[in-house]
Each structure stands twice: as C-alpha cells, then as structure tokens.
Image: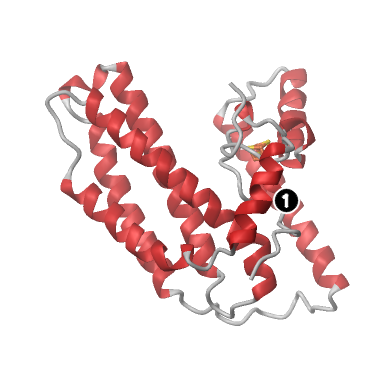
Amino acid sequence: MSTGAAWSPPHNWCDRRCERCPIASTCGVHVACTRRRAERVARGDDPDSPEAILEGVVRTLESAVRMAEQMGREAGIEIERPLAQPPVVLDGVRVQRVGERVARALAQVHAPADATSEPLAEAADETIALWSLLVAKAARVFSYTVDFDPDIWARDAEPNLLLIQRVRDALSCAFDQLQREWRGGSIPDDVWDGVEHLDRLLSPLFDCVNPSAQLYLEVLIAQGLAPSPFVARD
Ligand code: SF4
C-alpha cells in the first residue's frame, strides 16, 4: 500500500515533545511556537500563562484556516458552501469512549492520600500523557477508514500507526513504573479493560501497514530525520 516515500510532515506523526526532538530546529511547528514565545517574553508577558497559551491556540487555528482556504481555492472548492454531515466512524466513537473511561480511572491515581509522592505523580502524568496521545492518534487513523483513500492512508495513517506502536510500548513501561510507585494501590481493572479494548480495535489496522513503511522509517531514523519519539535527544 505504501512506498513510504511521501509521508506527511513529521509534526503530523510525532509526540510533540519538541524539547527532546532532534529535528526541532527545522520543524515549522516548533519554530512558530518558539517565535511566539519569544514575542511574549519581549513584551514582558508570561509565556506560560493561560492567556498566552490560548493566544497560541487561536493563532494556530487562524493559520490553519488560512491554509485550508488557500488549498480550497487552488482545488476549486466552494468553501462557503455548507459541508455535508460527516459520517460517523463507529470505531472512532468506541476509541473516544474507551479513551475517556481510562482517562477518568487514571485521574483517580492523584486522589489517594499518598498522592504527595512526587515519583507517583510523575508516573501518573506520564501515563495519562501517553494514553491521551494514543487515543488521539487512534481516532485520527480511524477517521481515514471512511471513504478510504490509499494516498491519504499511505501519507498519514501509516506513519501514525508506526507512532501508535511506539507509544503503546512506552505506555506499557509507564504502567510498570506507575505500579512500582503506587505503593498500597493497584491500577484499576477499568484501565486494563480499556487498554485491552483499544488493543483489539487497533490490531487489524497494524496489518495494513506495508513493510516498506517500516523500512522507510528506519532510513529516516538512520539519517536523523525522524522526530521524537522515534529518535529522542537526551
Ligand atoms: S516533536 Fe519534533 S516534529 Fe513534532 S512538533 Fe515538536 S519539533 Fe516538530
């Protein structure tokens, strides 16, 4: 299915941990975020304030809308015309539900009396971050299964499925760490049930990744062109 030769830009299949990403200096997303941060610092504003973060989100959305309008014009699409109701992706809905259920259960890890333990809090945060990324990426890939387009699949779904496999492995390690730090507690059954459910949903999709995509990724890694988490700078 894929030749691996025309993947979407790396910021579409990374984990957004720019601080450890080896290609941050050439990544448009990271460069734009760094520029905005520098502008706020120069204005004397707190770059980490909720207002600053919201401003960043708004500017990113505005930029995305401008790009979409431009692409629509180039493709001859009447962008003022109301869009048809998008089809419901049943597996996408299942992913969303299981994602919320597990996230709620994981959030309880902060509640016990020993939650002041910093290693426990860090392990819980890492687990929630990895789970959230996994669910978001799974939902993205499932959205491509409706009106299937082999080009879009090869360009964006395949690298994201390779990312999902990487994140899923990291999540297993994070669960081990969480269990070690959570003395007197144990990870709720709801979490394990949810993770198993997501694994079952994803399993058939992994069979749709062409072996050439894995080879292409390995070349990118060897050349230092793959983003975090495929290559992580310490
Ligand atoms: S993790 Fe790397 S590829 Fe992704 S947004 Fe950050 S710098 Fe870009």
Percent across and percent down for residue 100 are 33, 53
- Indicate left or right for 116 with 204 as reference: left
**Front residue of this view, candidates 116 and 206:** 206
| 111 over 8 or under it: above or below | above
Amino acid bearing label 1 = Pro
Quick one: SS at disc 1? Answer: loop
Pick the quarter of the image with the C terminus: top right
Question: What is the image's colouring?
Answer: secondary structure
**Would you say the beta carbon of the disc 1 residue lies within 8 angstroms of ligand 1?**
yes
Outermost residue, right side: 74
Above or below, 163 relative to 197: above
The residue drawn where x is 48% and y is 53% is 136
Judging by the rendered image, the residue that carries numbered circle 1 is: 9
Q: In the figure, is residue 200 to the left or right of 54? A: left
Quadrant observed for ligand 1 in the rendered image: top right
- The percent position of residue 45, horizontal first and vertical second, equals 68, 21
Q: Is residue 58 visible?
A: no
